[in-house]
Amino acid sequence: MSETDRPFEPRIVAFFCTWCTYTAADLAGISRMQYAPNVRAIRLMCSGRVDPQFVLAAFRDGADGVLIGGCHPGDCHYQEGNVNALRRFELLRRMLRDFGIEEGRVRLEWISAAEGDKVQRVCNEMTERVRALGPLRLEPGPRRRVGVGVVPVGAAEAAAGPAAGEASEPVGVLETEGREAR
């Protein structure tokens, strides 16, 4: 069977809080609950540690969906980590919408350590939702090679803002090779 004949199977990256959601995923495994193998869990100390750049990097590196799991509000081991996660998530959703990434590709869930059945349900629902959306096809932005490091194309111009009467243009990403600066 060729690659084009195979049905689409989404790749989902899950950022799970070690104290609750990751422990619930472990409970689901120990309890032999079957859930979609499409989800790859990454354990973090707290859902508040999920930086929007982690999500963008997951999409850039081939994920079709991202799931974030944390402790229920009020139960965070770090007092307000999940509140911070919720604030960042709302900003992230707006940013992804601006990038043209469907809202159904990212999800935030509160799952306690005793809710292995909820991990099973959420992973299966997320897999089905992303499968229905199809593969994520990101359009590459403008890139040019110079110097060392990754620098936004037009960053200086963007920081200065448009001149009077000029329209602002989107800022691309500058990809560079691993050469040392001279």
Image: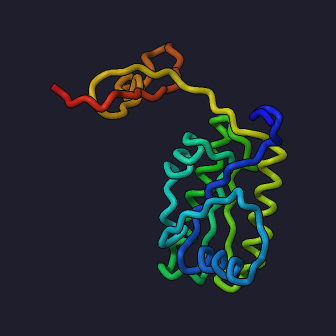
Outermost residue to the top: 165
Reply above or below: 124 against 1: below
* Residue 82 screen position, x and y as percent: 57, 71
**Residue 173 vs residue 44, the one in the foreground:** 44
Outermost residue to the front: 1
Image quarter of residue 138: top right
Q: Which residue occupies 38% across, 22% down?
A: 157
Q: Which residue occupies 73% across, 39% down?
A: 135
Left-right relation of 177 to 117: left
Reply above or below: 159 against 49: above
Left-right relation of 149 to 138: left
* Residue 18 screen position, x and y as percent: 53, 75
* Residue 171 screen position, x and y as percent: 48, 27
Q: Which residue occupies 68% across, 41% down?
A: 97
The colour scheme applied to this rendered structure is: rainbow
* Residue 92 screen position, x and y as percent: 59, 50
Image quarter of residue 158: top left
The mark total stands at 0
Q: Can residue 165 be seen in this view?
A: yes
Quadrant of the drawing holding the C terminus: top left
